[in-house]
Amino acid sequence: MKPHALLATLAALVLLPAQAADMNKVLRVALNAPETGFDPAKVSDLYSSTVTENIFDPLVTYDYLARPAKLIPNTVSALPTISADGKVYTFRLKPGIHFAADPAFKGKKRELTAADYAYSIKRHLDPSIHSPWSFLVDGRFVGGNELVKAAGKGALNYDAPLEGIKVLDRYTLQLTLTATNFNYLPILAMPAFGAVAREVIEANRDNTNAHPVGTGPYLLKEWKPGSRIVLEANPGFRKLVFNATPGNDPVDKAVVQALQGKTLPQVGRIEISVIEEEQPLWLSFLNRQLDVSGIPQAALQSALVIDPKNPLKVRLAEQYARQGIQLQRQLLPEVTFHFFNMQDPVVGGDSKDKIALRRAIAMSFPVSEAIASIRRGQAVPMNYIVPPGVAGHNPAFRGAPKYDPAAANALLDRFGYRVGADGYRTRPDGKPLAIELACGTSSTDKQWNEYWQKTFDTLKIRLGFRQGKWNELSKANHQGKLQMWGMAWGADYPDGENFMQLLYGRNAGDSNAADFKNADYDRLFEASLKLPHGAERSQLYDAMNKIVVAQQPWIFGDIRMRSTLAHSYVKGLKLHPLLNTSWRYLDLQK
Amino acid sequence: MLAYIVRRVWQMVPTLFGVMLLLFVLFNWVGGDPSYILAGKNLSAEALAGIRQQLGLDLPLPQQFLIFVRQVLTLDFGTSWSTQQPVSALLHSRIGPSLLLTGSILLLGTVLAIGIAALVAYLRGSVTDRLVTLIATCAMSVSALVYIIAGQYWLAFKGGWFPIMGWSDSTLDNLLHYLPLPLLLGVIVGLAPDIRFYRSCFVEELGHDYVRTARAKGLSEPVIMLKHVLRNAMIPVVTSLMMSLPYLMMGAMLLETFFGIPGMGKEVVMAVERSDFPVIKAITIYIALATMLFNLLTDIVYKLIDPRVQLH
């Protein structure tokens, strides 16, 4: 389906509350790991965001059907006007949108205004909140740094005027950036930038995680941390009618057939269980105790018929297809990679011998074999820092070196890594060569370790594993104590900048886990920030990818494929690369 | 007796202090730094320092320990570092499901194990005794995880006799629907080692002279077993039971995880994974207190069971 062939729009016909949800329709879903809370300025984990996405409204959101992902107005009447220099964004809110009822409103209806968004965005700047998303706002708004500096370690003065985040009138919000950035809008579509009401936050200051009150389609009815979350349709939610024109995609057609003309949401209650083990998750789905579910790794072989020649070509196993179970799949907007500590005396640095060592390791790691075995073929090799589905991706670029252990050994020979009497290589200066790879403790980590051991054995390099919890390893990496470690980075927003910044020198010690510092890369990155998504920026991204290929601070890993199943009575499902859930679009027709 | 109880309670103070010191040292040594979890993707030095300051992790260690002492004295452990929920509320919501599950398992498992153990001890050397011992030995060699996975698959999924998992706000609903399968599996897991242990207690008692004397007096075997042997065999049984009581609070992590029971076992695992020290502190201290109290209670029960026992 061509992206432009589809024009799916959600039309807010009348901004009056119109409870359409059937409270007898209960959607039962599961999270694979425990959430932490529901204050958009305090949580950043996927599981919490999955819930906050349905409670809070960001200014803009994504068209449910359009691919690649397309931004559309959410609580604003139109996409913002952006000044010619890419610095000033002006939003005009729709009047008549109200927060869900809360005691903090003292029985009155509370309308959503521009001031709520100003307050909500400022909360990410507040030093007393320690927002995990502060890196998306720090230094971005005119006057922001000064306001934060004035707050010291205390709370931000929300009433102080801030040129960068300005309320022009009740419904008009103006954001002024410190630097040209045509790509800031996707950040504002994140659940973290949904509007909260200041009264509610202040009334529940000690426990904002448990009191989410937004303008979204659902409200929090029950929360048992790490166990069960219940959402119910927000009775005050604005009338939102699904209205879309499908293209040729059969999934789109089915969605439109199920939802066209219907007021959203249709499902009245959502019961979310936290199920961390694969067996109960899978059996609960098969037993219809869950309506929608992913496929656990262990069940992939039985649930899918995988073409051995092309593992990405799959169909649902006959026994499940007969039941009418629906299968949907999509590549996740993420990358997985292993990085080298570029400041490490053994594997880091930009001398030719160090580059040769990193290149040889990259050339000897059997990515495709590992994908076939560990991922059951449900992933594709990563070849570009920006993954498919994210603005800036170049599908023609081949960044991963060809798997060639013989050439890798020859490369090491050539750069002085000689094989000693003990059968292992030494460094060019004759010192012993041993590399330590950090890893987790799960069974999947152990599977990956087997491939790494094989890789290093092939190269005749001693390998040690440093196992630990994520936070322990992250701390060790910050202290420069790791040599190699594997990571995954999922798109926070669908713009290449979110990925290219992972190797930006000024982010070293932060999101730049490899501590990679390259003046040319940094210069190109800074230039790319001033450009909108397009050919000119893509050229810069290509040049930056070439630098990474040449310097090899990363070993490119893979991009996972997500498979989701839903029972036949679940209507309106379409996986979205950026929206965490489809709940507001689902209907249950049992 | 009162003087003994007062003395034992007084002895708990240094023990509890030791537990606190050990826990504090262990957490600071190997507990992991929670600021790296709470920071999310924002791992800048400023963000990490800000979080550490907010959590009080930048304070000198003696000061942090004093805060811990105050928390123990007031039994107010503050709020969870990861969810920001009051620790007391978290544990309050978790303790009920855990006690319902583990308490039921202990009760049913103990009754069954004592009954079977007494029977096979009475029939010691017979085919029944050998068969039960053989089955118990084999059953003990199988991991608890296997019972849970197989039980959930065959009894709930294939058999359809139980829900796959779940938990309700209604105790009656839980007792009727959600508890039976995890209860059954929990009992099966614990039954074999209990039968073997209790059997050996009974067999040992059956070999004593007083049993021969009772038989010589013409007492019936049921009277000998129930009135004499059972009572004397109860000392090690009570010890075992009382020592396991504090751990009822800990819940049954595997059963809770597989059957979606919102109990303490899941909470403990989450707290450790997230380096959530307030929750870890609270659970550890409560378990330590309960262990000490039940130890004391065990000694008192000894005295009640066997008047010959002297408490010094």
Image (cartoon, rainbow, N blue to C red):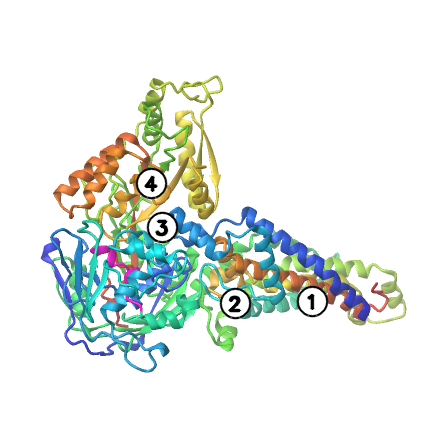
- Tell me the SS state at disc 4: strand
**On the same chain: label 4 and label 3?**
no
Query: Where is mark 2, residue-wise?
Result: B94
Q: Name the amino acid type tagged 2.
A: Arg
Residue count near mark 3 (Cα–Cα under 10 Å), binned few <14, some 14–19, many ≥20: some
Screen quadrant of the C terminus of chain A = bottom left
Please state the horizontal and vertical placement of residue A544, each as a whole percent of the image: 23, 36
Going from the N terminus, do you reach mark 3 or mark 2 first? 3
Looking at the image, residue A12 lies above or below residue A155: below
> CB under 8 Å between callouts 4 and 3?
no
Q: Nearer the viewer, mark 1 or mark 3?
A: 3
**Element type where label 2 sits in the image:** helix
Residue that appears at 22% across and 79% down: A18
Residue A192 magenta-drawn?
yes
Judge the density around disc 4: few (<14), some (14-19), many (≥20) Cα neighbours within 10 Å: some
Q: Is residue A514 left or right of residue A257?
A: right
Q: Give percent across and percent down for residue B174.
A: 50, 73
Q: Which residues are magenta?
A: A185-196
Disc 4 target residue: A337
Disc nearest the viewer among 3 and 2: 3
Report the Cα–Cα distance between label 4 and label 1: 58 Å
Of badges 4 and 3, nearer the viewer stands 3
Cα–Cα gap, marks 1 and 2:
32 Å
Q: Tell me which residue sits at (65%, 55%) in the image.
A: B19
Question: Which of the numbered marks, if any, corresponds to residue B115?
Answer: 1
Q: In the rendered view of the protein, which quadrant contains the N terminus of chain A?
A: bottom left
Residue name at image x 28 percent, y 34 percent: A518
* The disc label shown at residue B81, or none: none
For disc 3, the marked residue is B41
